[in-house]
Amino acid sequence: MEKTVKILFLILAVMTANIAVQAQDKPAYAVFEGDGKRADYGLMLKALAGADVIFIGETHNCPVAHWIEYELTRDLWEKDPDGLVLGAEMFETDNQLLVNEYVTGMISSDKFESEAKLWDNYYTDYYPLLSFAREKGLEFVATNVPRRYASYVKDHGLEALEKLPAEARSLMAPLPIDFEASEEDEAMFGFMKLISGSDGEKSYFAEAQALKDATMAWSIAQNPGRRFIHYNGNFHSDFHGGIIPYFHKYCPGKTVMTVCCVRQDDISALGEENLGRADFIVCVPVDMTMSY
């Protein structure tokens, strides 16, 4: 009897210790399906592996988001090493030659970084993806429109692009680009006017975003028959909007899946505001360290 009591006491002590350890866990992220159902990395990976195009939306200054991007890329490559193409918002179409020369080993990192237009967080966040493509012999597509044309549209509207020479227009989606301002776009107009201190001069900010989305979609659509992973800010693929309607127009019939990375105070459940944002939502604690 005494021995049985000791055993029961030991089991109870172990269970109590496990509960205490679990209570002290601080997970770096949690994965949910779009409807809020709890998922995990393995389930997400398996689902994404069945899609033709995978959009990974990121919070640009979130280190967990960039780590998830890299891990998904590596694991999807292991499932399909010969049919994978990578591409990113962070590289512009007029830098495609430089990207090609780097990933094929023709030029060094130093040469590439001295001549390409790179984001400030390139080395910490996008260099690993580009280097992975170089190491594995993968094509990497610079999908975004050159920023000077997005800026031009912001000031003059999409119609002004028709005045550009053919060489310039070759760096963007075919014209004309479909666009109809939504209520969200109108709200964004007001916000951009407020923060820019505009004196009333019209801004075509949403049209500039449409040019980016359409060009990214067009760039992706030029690679049919191979699985494509695209890295972009959440804004460009949230709620299957942004790039994705343009992609379906240019390349109908392809299956698309999306991932987005969000921050929440509590990551034990998906917040109502994040329901439906993507097929899979990676939640990160709001106090997670930012990379910049």
Image (tube, rainbow, N blue to C red):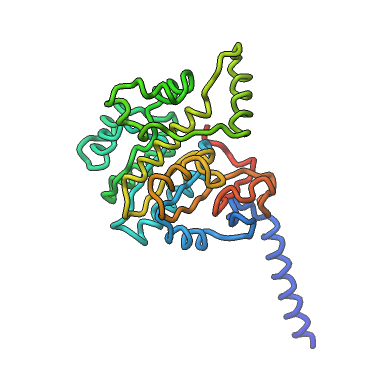
**Residue 79 vs residue 143, the one in the foreground:** 143
- Residue 141 position in % (x across, y down): 33, 41
Quadrant housing the N terminus: bottom right
Asked whether, in this view, residue 239 is left or right of residue 116, the answer is right
State the image quarter where residue 186 is shown.
top right
Q: Is residue 37 left or right of residue 234?
A: right
Q: Position of residue 39 (x, y in %)?
A: 58, 60
In the image, farthest residue toward the bottom? 1
Look at 35% across and 40% down and name the residue there: 219
Q: Nearer the viewer, residue 175 or 244?
A: 175
Residue 198, relative to residue 173: is it above or below? above
Q: Could you tell me residue 199's position as x and y percent?
A: 60, 11
Q: Is residue 64 visible?
A: no
Q: Is residue 120 left or right of residue 102?
A: right
The residue located at (71%, 70%) in the rendering is 15
- Give the answer, above or below, for where 198 lies relative to 121: above
Q: How many marks?
A: 0
Q: Residue furthest left?
A: 106
Work out whether residue 68 can be spotted.
yes
Q: Position of residue 10 (x, y in %)?
A: 72, 75
For this orientation, the residue located farthest to the top is 199
Name the foreground residue: 124 vs 193: 193
In the visual, does 160 lie left or right of 104? right
Q: Can you tell which quarter of the image residue 107 is in?
A: top left
**Residue 253, quarter of picture:** bottom left
